[in-house]
Image (cartoon, rainbow, N blue to C red):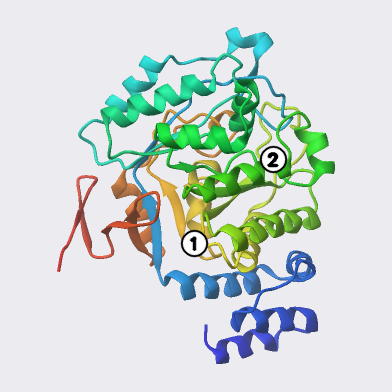
Amino acid sequence: MTNIELGQLNITLTDQSLRKIGEKVIAGERITPEEGVILFEKGSLSWLGSLANHVREKLHGQKTYFNRNFHIEPTNVCVFSCKFCSYSRLYAHKEEGWELTTEQMLDIVRKYDGQPVTEVHIVGGVHPKLTLEFFADLLRKIKSHRPDLHLKGFTPVELDYMFRKAKVSVEEGMKYLHEAGLQSLPGGGAEIFSADIREQICADKVDAEGWLKIHEVAHALGMHSNATMLYGHIESYHHRVDHMERLRNLQDKTRGFNTFIPLKFRNKDNEMSHIPESTIVEDMKMYAVARIYMDNFPHLKAYWPMLGRNSAQLTLSFGVNDLDGTIDDSTKIYSMAGSEEQSPSMTTAELVSLIRQVKRQPVERDTLYNVINDYSDSVIVDQQVNPVHN
């Protein structure tokens, strides 16, 4: 965005607070929590989109990242009872859920032998019988079978329970899993950091301080991680900004986060089904404000199985530069909550086409955003993508 374009945007602005924020963003200056709330309350969708796109293109140009990954969900049996969750089954009703053995999970890994996947994402419910040692053993066996596969796994909700049950500190537990092969953490379990909101929607699991500490310890070990926020339920704009501020502060300290992922609340088959889901306008506003506010997070991701392909494609005009991965249709966390994608799997060719349709540059990455293939000049034949090497 040029200065002339900023001027053109400002012509329609009568609110001086928005004008000031826009000028700060263009100048690369950090906005305050108060200004973050103003963006949510007063910013029009088109204006926010223009600012977010400016930040996105300043960081990444037209590049839009994805990776080839698959999920392992060890169990949906859980000791916690989050009101927004449609996925888990309480341990008292464990017969209604599933629990995979180590061998069954290794069979999932073996299914991808010879395929160019780069990451396995391991996350699920908190089962009291799946211990720290159980998962360390799983990690070792996956690494032994396929050393090149990046192992990303376990939310702080799972990790906190594992560590407490094993009677080890966060530092001891993270070091143990890291040595067993764990390389990075996903961003789940953050929900909304506000204690008041957590008390209402997920009172019994790890709190904000515990979540942040586990990520901080992981960063200190040289591991990278992601961060999420569950939005569109009972939280206010102030709660959203407070959540992002706490993440931004930790990122200032550690520089260990790769990407921020706003997650849309879905209301199917859970205890919060009476709460309407956010509109597409509110969704795009969330992504735009996140890109503007999270100035020290290099990437902003839209998790397409949760949003649906069309909405995820639209986010690329509102600050997003990552669409996650090809994923495997085994992931049930959002499909069970009523996401747009009931069989969340896309081929590489489909992802590349989705990105190119909106004039962005598809780039396949690994977990740490190292470029594997640039598909900006590529040929799609029979659902296969063939890079053109100049």
Please tell me whether mark 1 or mark 2 is closer to you in this view: 2
The residue that mark 2 highlights is 210
Residue 297 got which mark? none
**Which of pointers 1 and 2 lies earlier in the amino acid sequence?**
2
Picture quadrant of residue 147: top left
Classed neighbour count for the residue bearing mark 2: other residues with Cα under 10 Å, few (<14), some (14–19), many (≥20)? some
**Which amino acid type is shown beneath numbered disc 1?**
Leu
Classed neighbour count for the residue bearing mark 1: other residues with Cα under 10 Å, few (<14), some (14–19), many (≥20)? many
| Quarter occupied by the C terminus | bottom left
Figure check: 255 above or below 267: below
Name the element at disc 1: loop
Q: Between 202 and 50, which is closer to the camera in this rendering?
A: 202
- Which residue is depicted at the point 60% across and 86% down? 6
Asked whether disc 1 touches disc 2, contact meaning CB atoms under 8 Å apart, the reply is no
- Which residue is depicted at the point 40% across and 17% down? 102
User: How far from the left and from the top, in percent, is residue 100?
Assistant: 45, 16
Q: Between 146 and 232, which is closer to the camera in this rendering?
A: 146
User: How far from the left and from the top, in percent, is residue 131?
Assistant: 54, 19
- Residue 251 horizontal side relative to residue 60, left or right: right
User: How far from the left and from the top, in percent, is residue 253?
Assistant: 61, 60
Does residue 87 show up?
Answer: no
Q: Between 207 and 90, which is closer to the camera in this rendering?
A: 207
Residue 316 got which mark? 1
**Which amino acid type is shown beneath numbered disc 2?**
Gly
Name the element at disc 2: helix
> What is the distance, in whole Å, between disc 1 and disc 2 at their CAs?
32 Å
Figure check: 70 above or below 76: below
User: How far from the left and from the top, in percent, is residue 373?
Assistant: 26, 57
Does residue 349 show up?
Answer: yes
